[in-house]
């Protein structure tokens, strides 16, 4: 009967000895306890009483909070993955309204002029949030703006890394983003450290962006400069999530079909550039209906994978959890029809004292709708980041220390399990 009142159950999975965080008052607090105290009760709209209704409600038009952006085009410095990617920086309403509308960009987004960009750097100590959107999305997405708007209203800065080809961005090489493409966010974070050397950096990823962020944080390991990260509705094990999608009529004909259609339209926008890749077949691509068919026809051959399932296995972030060395919160709904509960790496979270998994038994995919349209997960993300930044001495966070599950410094050299090992070998930069 709890769902009649909108009461969802919340559970936590973490290491038995979660890391201790130094507080500004001079005491210490458990990372897991901090998350539990920060997370608001999950109270959802009882009319959307399961994951399907919650997820499908995202199709209902919702203007969401207005957020204004200035876009910067970056030239990739990666040796194997050249080309352009875009980053949208949050600016004030006055600055946004002072700029002339650009029909080539999403609403409330304009390009930085050369003069404007030269003044972007700062020595201030404002906290800054780096965001990674979901599949074929962008900085304009309502779920993302529901996280960005409340933190920037309290003095935070924020920016969004757009996947290549997304959010009306152009591509200059015949490759789109993919689920393990950590290189653009790595370049951005490195540049943010140069532009804003005194700002503590945090990050949040949504769905596919959560998978990318998890992989990035794990690959950086002890050298990660982010103070903390949050992954929302991460699909984790992409192969399992793919199988789960194809197992039901709704999964295949609704969710996979919608995502496949979104990607096919993205392909059509960039068709001329993408077809410069000899391995792509336009006729096959235009016949794609489902997500896995698009990944088979476009993503796998573009990146050198023999099959889409090889791509999924290589790009998944479930194993990466044990390599994370900064405070890391993951939020998933157990009834998520896209990010399947079967794919969540519960045991990996128990092995890493830097990580905490927060699961609700109800909420869908990037949904968790409450009365009024606000999404609970956005409240949870904002509450966690705000509490961590305000109460914890982030300059003394225990990132970078070699801690195993038993809290001892590792001495054994072989055999070694490498959670970030990849079959598709690329240099980090």
Image (cartoon, grey):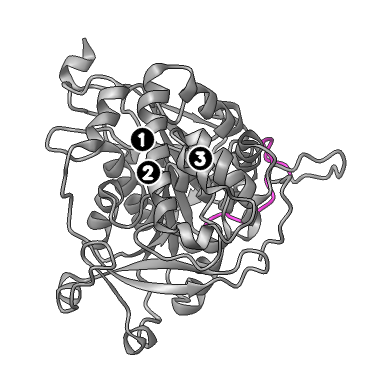
Please, is residue 244 above or below residue 304 in the view?
above
Which residue appears at 86% of the width and 45% of the height? 413
Residue 256 lies in quadrant: top left
Element type where label 2 sits in the image: helix
The label on residue 258 is: 1
The label on residue 294 is: 3
- Residue at the bottom extreme? 115
Residue 61 lies in quadrant: top left
Residue 167 lies in quadrant: bottom left
- Horizontal and vertical percent position of residue 14: 52, 32
The label on residue 119 is: none
Element type where label 3 sits in the image: helix
The label on residue 262 is: 2
| Total numbered labels | 3
- Disc 2 and disc 3 in contact, CB within 8 angstroms: no
Element type where label 1 sits in the image: helix
Q: Can residue 15 be seen here?
A: no
Which residue appears at 37% of the width and 83% of the height? 117
Residue 397 within the segment the image draws in magenta: yes
- Residue at the top extreme? 1
- Disc 1 and disc 2 in contact, CB within 8 angstroms: yes
The boundaries of the magenta stretch are: 396-408
Judge the density around disc 2: few (<14), some (14-19), many (≥20) Cα neighbours within 10 Å.
some
Of the numbered discs 1 and 3, the one sitting upstream in the chain is 1
- Horizontal and vertical percent position of residue 176: 51, 55
Quadrant of the snapshot with the N terminus: top left
Of the numbered discs 2 and 3, the one sitting upstream in the chain is 2
Which residue appears at 42% of the width and 24% of the height? 252
Please, is residue 138 above or below residue 75 in the view?
above
């Amino acid at each position: 009967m709890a769902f009649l009142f909108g009461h969802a159950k919340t559970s936590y999975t973490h290491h038995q000895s979660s890391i201790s965080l130094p507080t500004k008052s001079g005491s210490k607090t458990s990372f897991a306890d901090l998350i539990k105290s920060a997370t608001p009760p999950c109270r959802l709209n009882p009319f959307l009483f399961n994951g399907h209704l919650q997820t499908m409600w995202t199709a209902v038009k919702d203007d969401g909070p207005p957020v204004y952006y200035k876009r910067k085009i970056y030239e990739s410095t990666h040796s194997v993955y050249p080309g352009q990617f875009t980053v949208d920086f949050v600016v004030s309403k006055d600055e946004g309204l002072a700029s002339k509308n650009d029909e080539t960009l999403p609403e409330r987004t304009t390009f930085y002029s050369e003069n404007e960009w030269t003044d972007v750097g700062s020595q201030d100590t404002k906290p800054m949030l780096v965001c990674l959107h979901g599949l074929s999305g962008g900085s304009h997405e309502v779920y993302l703006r529901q996280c960005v708007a409340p933190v920037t209203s309290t003095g935070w800065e924020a920016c969004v890394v757009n996947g290549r080809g997304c959010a009306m961005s152009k591509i200059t090489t015949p490759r789109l983003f993919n689920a393990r493409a950590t290189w653009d966010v790595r370049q951005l974070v490195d540049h943010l450290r140069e532009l804003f050397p005194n700002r503590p950096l945090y990050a949040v990823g949504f769905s596919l962006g959560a998978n990318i962020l998890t992989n990035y944080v794990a690959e950086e390991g002890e050298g990660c400069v982010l103070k903390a990260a949050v992954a929302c509705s991460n699909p984790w094990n992409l192969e399992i999530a793919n199988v789960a999608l194809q197992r039901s009529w709704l999964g295949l004909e609704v969710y996979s079909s919608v995502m496949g259609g979104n990607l096919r339209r993205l392909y059509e926008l960039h068709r001329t550039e993408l077809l410069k890749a000899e391995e792509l077949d336009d006729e096959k691509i235009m016949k794609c209906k489902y997500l896995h068919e698009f990944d088979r026809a476009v993503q796998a051959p573009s990146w050198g994978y023999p099959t889409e399932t090889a791509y999924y296995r290589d790009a998944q972030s479930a194993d990466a959890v044990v390599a994370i060395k900064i405070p890391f919160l993951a939020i998933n709904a157990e009834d998520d029809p896209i990010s399947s509960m079967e794919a969540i790496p519960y045991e990996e979270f128990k092995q890493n004292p830097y990580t905490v998994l927060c699961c609700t038994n109800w909420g869908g995919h990037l949904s968790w709708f409450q009365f009024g349209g606000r999404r609970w997960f956005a409240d949870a993300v904002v509450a966690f980041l705000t509490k961590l930044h305000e109460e914890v001495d982030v300059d003394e966070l225990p990132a970078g220390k070699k801690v195993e599950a038993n809290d001892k410094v590792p001495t054994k050299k072989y055999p070694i399990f490498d959670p970030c090992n990849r079959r598709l070998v690329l240099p980090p930069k």
